[in-house]
Amino acid sequence: MLQVIALKTGSGQTVQAQICQMQQNHVDDFEGIWRDILRELGQDDAFWSWATKKRLSVNDDRFEAYAIEYEGLTQGLLWLETRWHRSWLPQRYPLVYVEALASAPWNRKSLEDPPYLYGVGTALLLFARQRSLALGYAGRVGLHALPASEEFYRQRNMMASGQDPDRENLRYFEYGRLLQSVDG
């Protein structure tokens, strides 16, 4: 699966990147380039094991792992669970659950202003929504946000729910059903 997407550079130029299934080179970029930068900057996701996430996505068909590439370098990573999670809304609809989403350190406005590329995290989140549509879940997506990322999800109009004691008190966010426009 390959999808071409448009992103903006820090200077405002539109460039074409691609979302693809995670490969070993994406894990290698995280471990060989990202991890030390993230650790040095005290980022919570520095300790994630993308190698484990990739392995699970290969061995367990309820998991999927993706990456954004631009100019031969991994710019973002996404790990989804597609079968076991349900909405926190009373109807308990099935949804795509974002287990992990990360942008490269140089693409995070909180770390690099302006970032090298704008929109990496947003593109991954929208891709999760597209997967939800493709799976028949009407665009429903849920996730638990790291505290430093809560504002990012609020700005993308995800509904914030309470903190989840079963998930280290992380706040839960959800996109409900994606309403289709009707041309009339």
Image (spheres, rainbow, N blue to C red):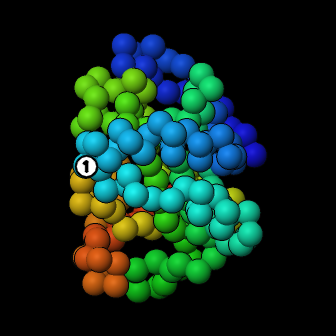
Foreground of the two, 34 or 72: 34
Q: Position of residue 146 (x, y in %)?
A: 30, 61
Snapshot quadrant of residue 90: bottom left
Task: Point out residue 158 in the picture as x, y percentages from the top left corner.
Answer: 35, 59
Q: Say whether residue 129 is visible.
A: no
- Mark 1: few/some/many CA within 10 Å (<14, 14-19, 20+): few
Question: Circle 1 sits on which residue?
Answer: 42
Point 35% across, 38% down: residue? 37
Residue at the (29%, 77%) spot, across then down: 168
Q: Nearer the viewer, residue 151 or 139?
A: 151
In what quadrant of the picture does the C terminus appear? top right
Q: Is residue 45 left or right of residue 93?
A: left
Q: Taking the image as drawn, is residue 134 in sight?
A: yes
- Residue 32: % across, % down: 51, 39
The structure residue drawn at horizontal position 63% and vertical position 76%, both measured from the top left corner, is 83
Residue pictured at 53% horizontal, 78% vertical:
85
Circle 1: residue type = Gly
Task: Left or right? Give the position of 166 relative to 6.
Answer: left
Query: Image height check: is 90 above or below 31?
Result: below
